[in-house]
Amino acid sequence: MSTPARVVGWKAWGARSGVAEAISLAWRAGRARLLLEVLVTLTGAALPVAAAWFTKETIDRLVRADVEPRTVLPAVLGLVGSGLLVAVSTRVARYLRAESDRAIGLIAQDRLFASLERFTGLARFEDPSFQDTLRLAQQSSGYASGQLVGGLLSTLTALVTAAGFVGSLLVISPLLTLVVVLAAGPALLAQLRLSRRQARVAWEISPVQRREFFYSTLLSTVEAAKEIRLFGTGPFLRDRMRAERIASNLAHRRLDRQELLTHGGLALMSAAIGGAGLVWAAVQAASGHLSVGSISMLVAAIAGVQNGMAQATSSVANAHQQLLLFDHYLTVTRAAPDLPVRKTGRRLSSLTTGIELRDVWFRYGADHPWVLRGVNLVIPRGRVVALVGANGAGKSTLVKLLCRFYDPERGTITWDGEDIRDLSPEELRHRMSVVFQDFMRYDLTAAENVGMGDITAMGEPRRLEQAARMAGVHETLTALPAGYRTQLSRVFHGGLNGSDESIGVQLSGGQWQRVALARAFLRDRRDLLILDEPSSGLDPAAEYELSARLREHRAGQTSILISHRLGTIRDADVIVTLVDGRVAEEGSHDELMRRGGHYAELFRLQARGYQSVDPAKPAAARREDVGWSTS
């Protein structure tokens, strides 16, 4: 992934690659428009030179003693025509550039997020360095690619204009031409150095800006509003946000000062050269070596060369900076898949025997502790396996490995005896239905929230309603202001047509959990059902009702059930207790209770919480009775 070294040590081949990619995007966005833009650009670049020559001819003819209107008219008409064409070409070029920016940005953004879909795992999304690269890549996809093409065209315009004025100035004074051209060298080097500094600052402050955005989001979203107001943490978070903004401003201030010194020095140098040229021209005119028109041409040529070279230098520097930022886009779009598949040519078949974990070890990084330690587990087809254990025992991590969001560091996971690393992740997940503990709450309509479980059902209201009924949330969604068309969010409000669908509604935690379950139930006829804490947000009555629905739904289906509420998993075919990332015991509820091990102890502790409590006991003893001390 991208690092500060990538920004500082940017290579020529990377520049060529970035330029080629940007031009390819522009060509794909509209080849006819791009060719027209180049034509208009070249025409506009030549017009200032033509206008300067027409001005010279007009002045020279006007100062003649025998001047006649018919001799002046062609030069004047040429000057007027040049001015009109400059005005028109400028507006046309601006319109074409805006159209190109929008078209290129659309394609670049789509390509970026299509590239993200190749990352089938989660590791890169949990990497702060990748998050910084991705943020800069998103910015680049929105404007850098278009600005890069625009910068190249601006450079072309400036160089054509400067070349025309250099030729014009060369006719008048070769020595002065040499001085003006050589002065552009230091300016180019200074601008390139400044552009590298700008790109480096953009990388360095990226974490700062992400933290500032994090604090601003906390202070402005409804999810955090309750706790912030109850605990009075607003000033604390605001101070944190302000500190990040101050750090960002400080970095920009140092950059602005460097820009001031660089641009100020270049402006003084240009003014000095222009002044010296004007003095020389005045002396030559006084001695009769230059005509009045030649003086105007010389002044225009010096200004044109300086402005053209300055514009070219600025455009090159800006293009260089955009290329440095565009490199983040290329880093993401050209990154290899994070979980490569060993091609076997075999398609994934329906589960016939079961899933097996063989000596599975896993940790989230080389500097992290082991989460799973030599796990051996068989999940037979058509059986319900429940996972039990304290927080951090590895239950949810095991689910992530089964979904192949990560690969084990050691050991294998097999589907009917075949290593899942040899299978297509898309096909593997297509055969699963999962409710995650940290399920998503989409800022979409109720129908879309359910339909996200299987987008092929988006246009089938009956399937959506059937899944919602199974999850016990159909009546809730039907009673919403616009029924299933109601937006389950207050983030977006007010449709283009002002319809009722724009009304945002917030569901309760338990209602959201049922929507997540409906999403999973929509994926019917799957080989594996995984439920990670499916009833954690429900009250006892709702939990009892849901448990009955789940037993009915998963009958005869291969299922994995994770729950801290042991009463909901006691009817599982096999209960597996995880302790410190290892399988401590497994068996049915009755078998594990007879053994009196970890599961039996956890079950008795929970059951004790539902027994009567003697109010005469001390508070500490009462807490122990209900199992509070075991949390």
Image (spheres, rainbow, N blue to C red):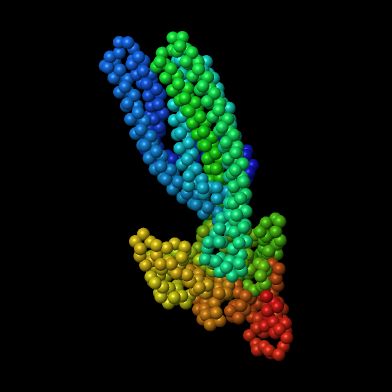
The residue located at (56%, 81%) in the rendering is: 540
- Provide residue 211's location: percent of width, then percent of height: 60, 55
- Provide residue 66's location: percent of width, then percent of height: 30, 10
The residue located at (51%, 33%) in the rendering is: 314
- Dividing the picture into quadrants, the one containing residue 365 is bottom right
Q: Nearer the viewer, residue 488 or 552?
A: 488
Is residue 284 toward the left or the right of residue 2 in the image?
left
- Provide residue 549's location: percent of width, then percent of height: 50, 78
- In this rendering, does residue 43 appear at all? yes
Farthest-out residue, left:
70
Task: Indicate the quadrant containing the C terminus: top left, top right, bottom left or bottom right.
Answer: bottom right
- Dividing the picture into quadrants, the one containing residue 253 is top right
Q: Nearer the viewer, residue 259 or 166?
A: 259
Residue 500 to residue 188: above or below: below
Q: Nearer the viewer, residue 519 or 86?
A: 86
The residue located at (71%, 61%) in the rendering is: 369
Residue 85 to residue 419: above or below: above
The residue located at (69%, 82%) in the rendering is: 623
- In this rendering, does residue 525 appear at all? no
Residue 504 to residue 104: above or below: below
Residue 596 to residue 614: above or below: above
- Provide residue 501's location: percent of width, then percent of height: 38, 66
